């Protein structure tokens, strides 16, 4: 199993551009989530999904959209990039409920918005 | 929503010294998880504690869950340079997990 994969690993965007961060898992996990990590602020939840077709907002959802059309994939869309979205983005999955089961993290995408 | 507070934010130790990080919640937690993130890497699950007063050990790492299930600690005995990284605790908030801000550990050889 590849586990949780994320693409791209690095990305530079100009303010106002849009893009999609890809996340896929091959463990048949129901729960998937997106976090952003900024220095000194830990991991903040952006959006999460408890199963295909179901998504919900986390702590910092503004400026981001998600969809979950399949169990495997959970892309994160930046609608109009802003410098404040410069961060490291991690996708994670767990077998079922996100509050109780071990989270498996992807390698991350390092995004810079200029 | 549920928050878990973690202290200290940074800890510098000499190799061989002990290290402890603490995690506190204002409400009772059904469980608490600990993760380690190496510099430049991604968080990796270490352990989950579920029972009141639970203590679990992994080699030099000792994890404790408080009797009231509102706090937890991670203690590393005789740190090594391989222990360098950021340690996060995480507690449930509804159907999701909320992470503490982490403790960044540096170890001087």
Image (cartoon, coloured by chain):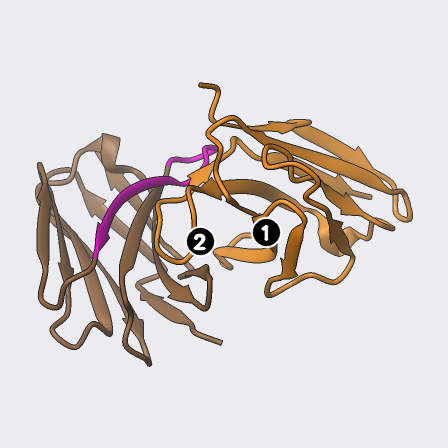
Chain colours: A orange, B brown
Q: Residue furthest top?
A: A1
Task: Write the residue at 9% across / 45% down.
Answer: B57
Q: Earlier in the sequence, mark 1 or mark 2?
A: 1
Position of B56 relative to B54 (above/below): above
Mark 2 neighbour class, 10 Å CA radius: few under 14, some 14 to 19, many 20 or more = many
Could you tell me which quadrant the C terminus of chain A lies in?
Answer: top right
A40 lies left or right of B60: right
User: Relative to the observer, which residue lies in front, A78 or B103?
Assistant: A78
Task: Write the residue at 62% across / 44% down.
Answer: A52
Q: Is label 1 on the same chain as label 2?
A: yes
B45 lies left or right of B80: right
User: Relative to the observer, which residue lies in front, A34 or B15?
Assistant: A34
Chain under label 2? A
SS at mark 2? loop
SS at mark 1? strand
> Which residue is denoted by mark 2 in the rendering?
A98
Could you tell me which quadrant the N terminus of chain A lies in?
Answer: top left
Task: Write the residue at 20% across / 60% down.
Answer: B50
Residue B86, image x, y percentages: 36, 46
Residue B22, image x, y percentages: 24, 64
Q: CA distance from mark 1 to mark 2?
A: 9 Å
> Which residue is denoted by mark 1 in the rendering?
A49
Residue B99 on the magenta segment: no
Q: Residue furthest right?
A: A16
Position of B98 relative to B15 (above/below): below
Mark 1 neighbour class, 10 Å CA radius: few under 14, some 14 to 19, many 20 or more = many
Region rendered in magenta:
B38-49
Residue A57, image x, y percentages: 64, 62
Q: Quadrant of residue A56?
A: bottom right
């Amino acid at each position: 199993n590849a586990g949780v994969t994320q693409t791209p690993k690095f990305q530079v965007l100009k303010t106002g551009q849009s893009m999609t961060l890809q996340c896929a898992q091959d463990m048949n996990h129901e729960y998937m989530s997106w976090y952003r990590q900024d220095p000194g602020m830990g991991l903040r939840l952006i959006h999460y999904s408890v199963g295909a077709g179901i998504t919900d907002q986390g702590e910092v959802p503004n400026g981001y959209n998600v969809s979950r059309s399949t169990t495997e994939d959970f892309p994160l869309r930046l609608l109009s990039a802003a410098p404040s979205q410069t961060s490291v983005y991690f996708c994670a999955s767990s077998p079922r409920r996100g509050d109780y089961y071990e989270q498996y993290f992807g390698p991350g995408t390092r995004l810079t918005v200029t | 929503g549920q928050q878990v507070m973690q202290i200290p934010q940074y800890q510098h130790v000499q190799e061989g010294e002990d290290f402890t990080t603490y995690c506190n919640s204002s409400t009772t937690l059904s469980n608490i998880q600990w993760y380690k993130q190496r510099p430049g890497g991604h968080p990796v699950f270490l352990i989950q504690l579920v029972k009141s007063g639970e203590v679990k050990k992994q080699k030099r790492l000792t994890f404790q869950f408080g009797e009231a299930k509102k706090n937890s600690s991670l203690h590393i005995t005789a740190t090594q340079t391989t222990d360098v990284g950021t340690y996060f605790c995480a507690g449930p908030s509804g159907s999701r997990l909320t992470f503490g801000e982490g403790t960044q550990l540096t170890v001087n050889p």
